[in-house]
Image: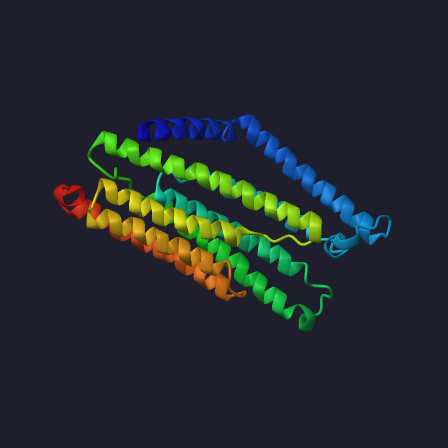
Amino acid sequence: MKSLILSGSEFIFNKLKSIWENPKTNKFTSIFLVFAFIISITISYLDRSNLVSLGKWDEYFSNPFFAIEISFTLLLILELLSLIFVLPKSVSKSVGKQLELLSLIFLRSAFKEFSHITDFNWKVMEIPVIHMLFYVFGALLIFVLLGFIYKLQLHTPLSTTEDDNKGFIQSKKLLSLFLFLAFFIIGFHDVYELLKTGEYLRSFHTFYNTLIFSDIIIVLFALRYTLNYYKIFRYSAFVVATIFIRISLSTEPIYDVLIGVIAAIFVLCLTLTYNYFLKDLPDRKLQD
């Protein structure tokens, strides 16, 4: 029964992944984002010209830069969906994808701060500009750190047994399907609240909470296949990095950038030290 569930979930996951990574899907999402941006700009112009009335959405579209926020939010949602398909590959790639998302969130926040500037007078725009500088350089630092992380990452199988490695990957694919379901449940709830109240909840926080729990489950799955200290420590440390990213999304400007950059530095240090162990420790100690 267990084998049937894992095999079935693997088939469904692989099918969804092939659809998502299909070049036609990429082309469609690109066209969708362009049209969403153009439509948002048009609606914003009509609203500001008093040619249309959007009722409870007037507050949003009266800002000419809201179209940028819409486009980046849609891009982040698509990147969040991509994260689900990365999870079964490796926990390190999953954390790397989360840091990519965080850097994009910082860039979106920089655009959002720019929209707060209503008068190009230093006294008026001092705080937004300072926040923008922190966001753009924070995103750049994470971008640079990720480059080193991806270049240095070495991947070793969790177990020396092929069946164990296959079972571990199948378990992660089953977990990813639950995340896929959670993604759409949270998304439908956000759309419902948007249509009902005119307020977009931006439930990145809720989904990141789900990611933290899923990462912990992966660590517990790993215990079934290995008790090796170095590998378990690495998996657990990546969960801590996810928690730091989640905290970064909940804190005030400047502090969120500092915590996000610290999370990226932590992952880089973890990668460097783990690579040292891989190189200098006997294979027996990494496999026992």
Q: Is residue 166 visible?
A: yes
Q: Quadrant of the N terminus?
A: top left
Counting from the top left corner in percent of width and height, residue 234 is at 28, 50
Q: Is residue 29 above or below residue 122?
A: above
**Colour scheme in use:** rainbow
Left or right of 226? Residue 152 is right
Counting from the top left corner in percent of width and height, residue 143 is at 46, 50
Counting from the top left corner in percent of width and height, residue 181 is at 50, 39
Q: Is residue 147 visible?
A: no
Name the residue: 64% across, 35% down: 32
The quarter holding residue 169 reads top left
Left or right of 68? Residue 286 is left
Q: Residue furthest right?
A: 51
Disc tally is 0
Q: Is residue 75 above or below residue 270?
A: above
Q: Nearer the viewer, residue 36 or 250?
A: 250
Q: Residue furthest front?
A: 1
Q: Is residue 29 above or below residue 119?
A: above
Q: Nearer the viewer, residue 272 or 287?
A: 287
Left or right of 99? Residue 280 is left
Name the residue: 51% across, 54% down: 205
Q: Nearer the viewer, residue 126 or 103?
A: 103
Counting from the top left corner in percent of width and height, residue 16 is at 48, 29
Q: Quadrant of the C terminus?
A: top left
Q: Residue furthest bottom?
A: 123
